[in-house]
Amino acid sequence: MNKHIIVHDLGLVNYQDALDYQLRLFNQIIKTKIQNRKNNTEIETENHLIFVEHPNVYTLGKSGDINNLLLNKNELNDKKIQFFNTNRGGDITCHGPGQIVCYPILDLDNFFTDIHKYLRFLEEIIIKTLNDFGIASERSENETGVWIDPDLAFSRKICAMGVKASRWVTMHGLALNVNNDLSFFENIIPCGISNKSVTSINKEIGKHISLDEVKKTIIKYFVEIFSAKLIKGVN
């Protein structure tokens, strides 16, 4: 089993371009797995961890409700915000500059074949990362993602998650609010949950945080929690 992970730090990337980048890696892993089964071979599959920021964009999961988008097409155009239907899990979310979006493209056959466990591992990575920046966060029962004060009336989500898996290969991933403009969330019902708010690292601790430092911390805990090895970076 190959537990080496290649990190791709792509910077600010249009959502469609990032999706195409994901799909290229995702499809290559699946192709290798199909060839291995067909030819009875054991060619190693790769694992990738992609970091991006996106220009302002709303994305809707395959089980999401379009009514959770509170803008019509003309209003989206006026605000210069893109919208995409996606094949990930979850409902609607918002991406924008200052937010860290992380797309793990993993062959879970290299780690474990359990999607529930995979999501809990992603949550744990973010919980540990936030703790390093002085923020106590938790899971919320029956709701994927990472939250601040999830059991209180003023609970707020700081990290959204939505994934897709096929043949135990993953794509899509998580979005951690760091320095992004949270006002863009006012145009949606985030994740389809109307009675809770969103927050960011910046809002919680009252200062601007280096995205590079947060990404380094995410990588540190990704390697630790997945018992993985970092082999190189791609910029």
Image (cartoon, helix red, strand yellow):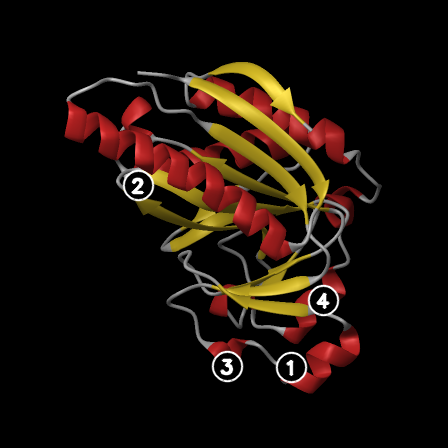
Q: Which one is in front, 187 or 195?
A: 187
CA distance separating discs 3 and 2: 28 Å
Q: Amino acid at mark 1?
A: Leu
**Residue 235, picture quadrant:** top right
Q: Which residue is mark 4?
A: 184
Helix, strand or loop status at disc 1: loop
Q: Position of residue 174 (x, y in %)?
A: 53, 45
Q: Secondary structure at mark 4?
A: helix
Callouts 3 and 2 close, C-beta under 8 Å: no
- Residue type of the residue flagged with mark 3: Asn
Q: Which residue is mark 2?
A: 115
Disc nearer the start of the sequence (3/4): 3
Would you name the residue on which mark 1 appears? 71
- Residue ID for mark 3: 67
- Residue at 66% in and 63% down: 57
> Going 70% across and 86% down the picture, which residue do you hit?
74
